[in-house]
Amino acid sequence: MPPEWRGAGAAIDATGFTPVESGKPPAGVLIAEGEWAGMKRMTGGSEAGPTGMPWVDSNGWKIRLLSMQNPGQQVWVHTKPPAANEVIRFERYLVGVADAASHGGRWVIEPDANFRRTLAAADPTAKKNWDRLKAAVRFFTERTQLCGLPARAVTGIVSDFSGANEVFSQEILNLAARQHLPYLPLLKTNLTSLPAGLKAVVYADEQAPTAPLRSLLLRFVEAGGLLMTTAAWGKVAGPVLPDTPTVRYAIHTVGKGRIAVPEGEESGDPYLAAADAQVLLSHRHDIARLWNGGPMGMFPTGDARRSVVHLVNYMGRPTADPVSLWIQGDFRTVTLHSFEYSEAKKLTIIRRRNGAEVHLPAIAIYAAVEAVA
């Protein structure tokens, strides 16, 4: 928890904000240190990750993990204010609000020095931006039904997410989200069953699983699931499939499923682990697909009867090309909700495979795409 913060957290009063006193979060609220959500800027341009796409920072994975670890508490994320001479595009504030709220949390808003100065001077642009910020916060407060659905996932990430396992396991969560791989964080210390619908599980810890946990994961594999492990799992008795040059794992068949273990004694890079999970799982189990999204994040929630896919554009402005979204399920209506539009928009459905495809209007910051069967 940061030593001090100021500003506003949630929209629950007439102004749309709740003041947060230094070191005194409201009852039932956990405040964690986070990042400025958005594209990471470097001197001369954007920083790119191993995929070559612009690298983005998001607090979504952290909010989901802390919410799972602290049931009954709401997670607010505080971000250290920028330096006095740093210029922040106003859209970064809207991205921060949307990034946190779409994942079930809140962002503690602490205006930068220039924003505070221009607001105090009654600058018309600053006043307009402040009203836009309040409207964005109020949007999520008034539409809790959009952000309260459980994650719709095909991959479980199993870990204690702490100690020696903290960096590797948490970075897998972060990177899986960046690759649009729908996941659930699963705490191994009290895991007695696996959620329905999972097609793959990643065991992310550097200690061998307990006998009950190993048995649970083996039953999942024998029934047809995919298990990816660290080197701590040990040897696998099943036959080895031919080498797959696109992944860095030895693939063993066990029952109806597969176990993928790292080749060598190292568990490897978390980015590669997340990428390999997507390759081994393939796209036939996709819940949602996004085309031309660029640095847009995607978080599918709900189920095959009612899905809400949250889209956050970390660039803060519309992409150059038209964006399309496909959602798995037999849906009758698809509606787009966004604080960027005065009212919800009904979208035309194109039936493809076992899902609904829609073409999206321009999204500069955020949209929730709600599909109902």
Image (tube, rainbow, N blue to C red):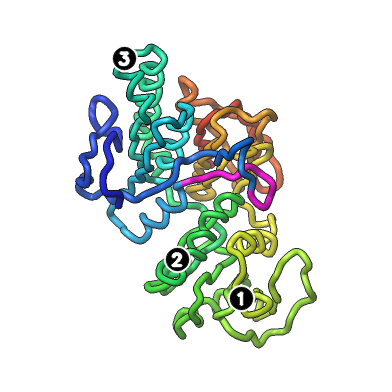
Residue 266, disc: 1
User: Image quadrant of residue 313?
Assistant: top right
* Residue kind at label 1, given as amino acid type: Glu
Of label 3 and label 1, which has the lower sequence position? Answer: 3
Q: In this view, does 13 lie to the left or right of 183?
A: left
Residue that carries the numbered disc 2 in the rendered image: 166
User: Quadrant of the rendered structure where residue 230 is?
Assistant: bottom right
* Viewer-side residue, 209 vs 232: 232
Callout 3 crowding tier (Cα within 10 Å): few <14, some 14–19, many ≥20? few
Q: Which residue is drawn at 60% across and 26% down?
A: 362
Q: What residue type is labelled 2?
A: Glu
The residues bearing labels 3 and 1 have C-alpha atoms spaced at a distance of 57 Å
Q: Which of marks 1 and 2 is nearer the N terminus?
A: 2
Secondary structure category for the residue under label 3: loop
Residue 317 in magenta? no
The picture places residue 231, in percent across and down from the top left corner, at 59, 78
The magenta segment: 49-58
Residue 82, image x and y in percent?
41, 36
Residue beneath the point at 52% across and 38% down: 312
